[in-house]
Image (spheres, rainbow, N blue to C red):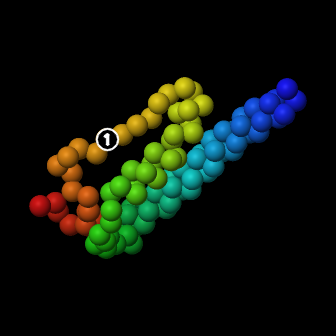
Amino acid sequence: MKIERKQLKLNSLNDQLQVVMSSLIFSESFIEDMLNMAQINSNVFAMDSHIFELQPVFDFILNIFKPLCAAKNIDLTFKIVDNLKPRVVLGQDPD
């Protein structure tokens, strides 16, 4: 009985830490976006072309918000539509 209570407490603490980590990652991204906006407004910002995979981006976003949703009993899922290209070139017009 005592071990089960400790395990529940550890699980709860782990869930809380995941929410904190998700919030920190989201905050870091928000700050980076704000700095980029400052560069854009001062005409210092330049965009380079980069090829990247979409799946890791979606996985990253899912991992940020999933603990926050789980804490509110919300099931967060996503589905990539069939006609979406798996690779994107950032900074170029789509085909």
Q: Residue at x 17, y 49 (%)?
A: 83
Question: Quadrant location of residue 41?
Answer: bottom left
Q: Quadrant of the C terminus?
A: bottom left
Question: Quadrant location of residue 57?
Answer: bottom left
Q: Amino acid at mark 1?
A: Lys
Q: Residue at x 28, y 45 (%)?
A: 80
Considering only vertical position in the picture, is 2 above or below 55?
A: above
Secondary structure, mark 1, is loop
Considering only vertical position in the picture, is 71 above or below 56?
A: above
Horizontal side of residue 1 vs 38, given as left or right: right
Q: Nearer the viewer, residue 41 or 61?
A: 61
* Residue 37 % position (x, y): 42, 59
Q: Is residue 47 visible?
A: yes
Horizontal side of residue 75 vs 92, given as left or right: right
To which residue does mark 1 refer? 79
Q: Quadrant of the N terminus?
A: top right
Question: Quadrant location of residue 7?
Answer: top right
* Residue 92 % position (x, y): 20, 66
Q: Is residue 9 visible?
A: no
